[in-house]
Image (cartoon, rainbow, N blue to C red):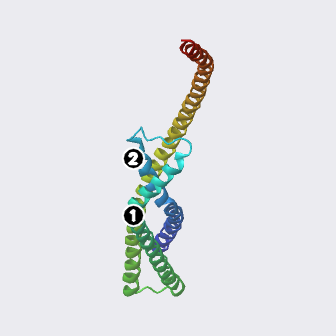
């Protein structure tokens, strides 16, 4: 009965760990995008003058792609490490399932026959011990992955805030550009009016001086 209870507890824990693995598996799909984008935006935050209006947004995109390539090697290593941990966790989970099924079959055999020998007891104890060890290792690996996931969430939040800052800065700069263009057009119009007023006067003045010269 005691072994049956431990087996049931381990089965429940195994189901929980499998659900955790599903959550962690979804995280790795976003890992490389979040990491290089967050690093790029953190870099631009340290350089507040880097604001790209209008058509220059395409230039910013090109620079972001270049920076992504710079960090790609490190991101690939991080992804490989995370993937290896997930694969090891899945392997440990399968081992745990196998040990649980094996211990359960032996427990059922004992319940049916009513006969228990020392060798069977030692085998059951060893199976339960191995299952617990695997469960502990799996928890440790999941804790490590959870820490990485939390760090990525923090980087994602920094990314979101930085994107908002960039959007506000872009709007402000666009307003300044529109204002500058409007002022430039006004200055050009004023200059044209000044020339149109000055040019006839200058022409009449020159005509007067020519007439005086020819008269002499």
Q: Nearer the viewer, residue 53 or 71?
A: 53
Secondary structure under tag 1 reads helix
Residue 95 found in image quarter? bottom left
Q: Is residue 146 visible?
A: no
Q: Nearer the viewer, residue 153 or 66?
A: 66
**Residue at left offset 56%, top offset 46%:** 55
Percent coordinates x, y for residue 93 in the rendering: 47, 73
**Residue at left offset 59%, top offset 14%:** 211
Percent coordinates x, y for residue 214 in the rendering: 56, 16
Q: Which mark is residue 78?
A: 1
Percent coordinates x, y for residue 146 in the rendering: 44, 57
Percent coordinates x, y for residue 83 in the rendering: 44, 69
Q: Which residue is mark 2?
A: 43
Mark 1 or mark 2, earlier in chain: 2
Q: Report the side of 155 relative to 214 (left or right).
A: left
Q: Is residue 106 above or below residue 96?
A: below
Q: Are marks 1 and 2 in contact (CB under 8 Å)?
A: no
Q: Is residue 89 visible?
A: yes
Q: CA distance from mark 1 to mark 2?
A: 20 Å
Q: Depth-wise, is mark 1 or mark 2 nearer the camera?
A: 2
Q: Is residue 47 above or below residue 212?
A: below
Q: Is residue 70 above or below residue 44?
A: below
Q: Nearer the viewer, residue 162 or 200?
A: 200
């Amino acid at each position: 009965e005691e072994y049956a209870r431990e087996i049931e507890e381990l089965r429940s824990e195994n189901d929980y760990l499998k659900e955790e693995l599903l959550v962690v598996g979804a995280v790795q799909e976003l890992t490389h995008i979040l990491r290089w984008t967050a690093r790029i935006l953190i870099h631009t935050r340290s350089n507040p003058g880097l604001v790209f209006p209008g058509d220059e947004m395409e230039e910013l995109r090109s620079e972001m792609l270049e920076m992504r390539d710079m960090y790609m090697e490190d991101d690939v290593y991080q992804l490989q490490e995370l993937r290896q941990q997930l694969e090891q966790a899945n392997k440990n989970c399968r081992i745990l399932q196998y040990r649980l099924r094996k211990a359960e079959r032996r427990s059922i055999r004992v319940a049916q026959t009513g006969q228990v020998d020392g060798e069977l007891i030692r085998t059951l104890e060893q199976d339960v011990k191995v299952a617990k060890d695997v469960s502990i290792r799996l928890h440790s690996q999941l804790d490590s992955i959870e820490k990485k996931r939390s760090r990525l969430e923090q980087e994602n939040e920094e990314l979101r805030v930085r994107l908002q800052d960039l959007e506000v800065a872009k709007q402000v700069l666009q307003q300044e550009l529109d204002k500058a263009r409007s002022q430039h057009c006004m200055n050009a119009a004023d200059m044209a009016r000044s020339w149109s007023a000055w040019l006839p006067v200058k022409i009449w003045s020159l005509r007067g001086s020519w007439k005086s010269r020819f008269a002499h």
